[in-house]
């Protein structure tokens, strides 16, 4: 029945009806999209950007501008290379000098200990030949002769005296301090005065074998072989003989 109604309906009426249906569908879709837009949260508009503070022209003028880096010239490079070479040469020379000084010092110590011992004079027993504070160099050995200045150990001390007589010789001293060896007067130009001094041995005195008789040049104060407290010196006590004075500088030279 209804199909017959649509068939009988004029074509123009059908067009109007379809257009009306489309309009109603369009209106419904608009209502739905409007409700969705109202239901969606509103997005905040971004805050407007504030313009960056601009520096004043005066402040810009005060700011120093960096100068562009400049490459060194060939002359500057050559000068720097020469300075570096000189610095290295100086370092090598300094090291060589230090090594040489160390070697010289080591050799000097070895020589001073084993070959040429150095001594400082204390006391007045060798005045006027050697005075207190003098520094002297000796030669090790026992090859001595009359008149030599000998160095020897005595009770953990080192003493300096003058060689007067050797083993088997006879020594005699008179009251005036004149010294006789084997009956002959001993010539002693190094003395400033003569004296018998501290003498408790029986004169004339014969020097024992393997020993030497020694006396100090300051005869009135020196304690030496004239006293039994010291006696004659054995070869085991001997260090050597003094040959040179190195201090003080005005008296630098050989010692007699």
Image: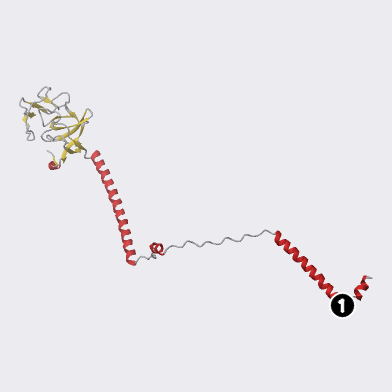
Quarter of the figure that contains the C terminus: top left
With respect to residue 23, does 134 lie above or below? above
In this picture, is 154 found above or below 113?
above
Task: Measuring from the top left, give residue 72's x and y in whole percent.
Answer: 35, 65
Which quadrant of the view contains residue 192? Answer: top left
Residue in view at x 29 percent, y 48 percent: 98
In which quadrant of the rendered image does the N terminus lie?
bottom right
**Which residue appears farthest toward the right when viewing the image?**
1
Q: Please give the name of the residue rendered at 73% of the width and 64% of the height, measured from the top-left corner.
A: 33
Callout 1: SS: helix
Circle count: 1
Tell which of 15 and 163 is nearer to you: 15
**Left or right of residue 4: residue 106:** left
Q: Residues within 10 Å of mark 1 (few under 14, many from 20)?
A: few
Q: Is residue 65 visible?
A: no
Residue 251 spot, x, y in % from top left? 12, 41
Q: Nearer the viewer, residue 131 or 48?
A: 48
Which residue position holds label 1? 11
> Is 190 left, or right, of 229 in this rendering?
left
For the point 75% across and 63% down, which residue is it? Answer: 32
Q: Position of residue 253 (x, y in %)?
A: 14, 42
Colouring chosen for the image of the structure? secondary structure
Answer whether residue 10 is visible to the viewer in this image: yes
- Quadrant in which residue 149 is drawn: top left
Whole-percent x, y for residue 168 in the image: 14, 28
> Above or below — where is 107 with respect to 3?
above
């Amino acid at each position: 029945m209804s199909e017959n109604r649509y068939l009988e309906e004029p074509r123009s009426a059908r067009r109007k009806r379809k257009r009306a249906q489309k309009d109603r569908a369009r209106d419904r879709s608009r209502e739905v999209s409007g409700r969705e837009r109202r239901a969606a949260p509103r997005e905040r508009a971004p805050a407007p950007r504030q313009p960056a503070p601009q520096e004043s022209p005066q402040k810009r003028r005060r700011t120093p501008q960096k100068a562009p880096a400049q490459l060194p010239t060939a002359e500057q490079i050559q000068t720097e290379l020469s300075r570096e070479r000189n610095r290295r040469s100086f370092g090598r020379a300094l090291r060589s000098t230090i090594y040489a000084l160390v070697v010289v010092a080591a050799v000097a110590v070895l020589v001073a200990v084993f070959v040429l011992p150095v001594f400082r004079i204390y006391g007045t027993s060798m005045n006027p030949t050697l005075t207190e504070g003098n520094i002297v160099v000796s030669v090790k050995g026992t090859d001595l002769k009359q008149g030599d200045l000998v160095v020897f150990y005595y009770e953990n001390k080192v003493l300096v005296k003058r060689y007067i007589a050797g083993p088997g010789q006879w020594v005699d001293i008179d009251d005036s301090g004149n010294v006789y060896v084997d009956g002959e007067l001993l010539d002693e130009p190094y003395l400033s005065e003569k004296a018998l001094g501290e003498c408790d041995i029986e004169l004339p005195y014969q020097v024992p074998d393997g020993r030497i008789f020694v006396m100090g040049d300051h005869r009135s104060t020196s304690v030496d072989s004239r006293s039994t407290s010291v006696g004659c010196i054995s070869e085991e006590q001997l260090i050597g003989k003094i040959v040179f004075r190195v201090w003080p500088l005005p008296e630098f030279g050989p010692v007699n």
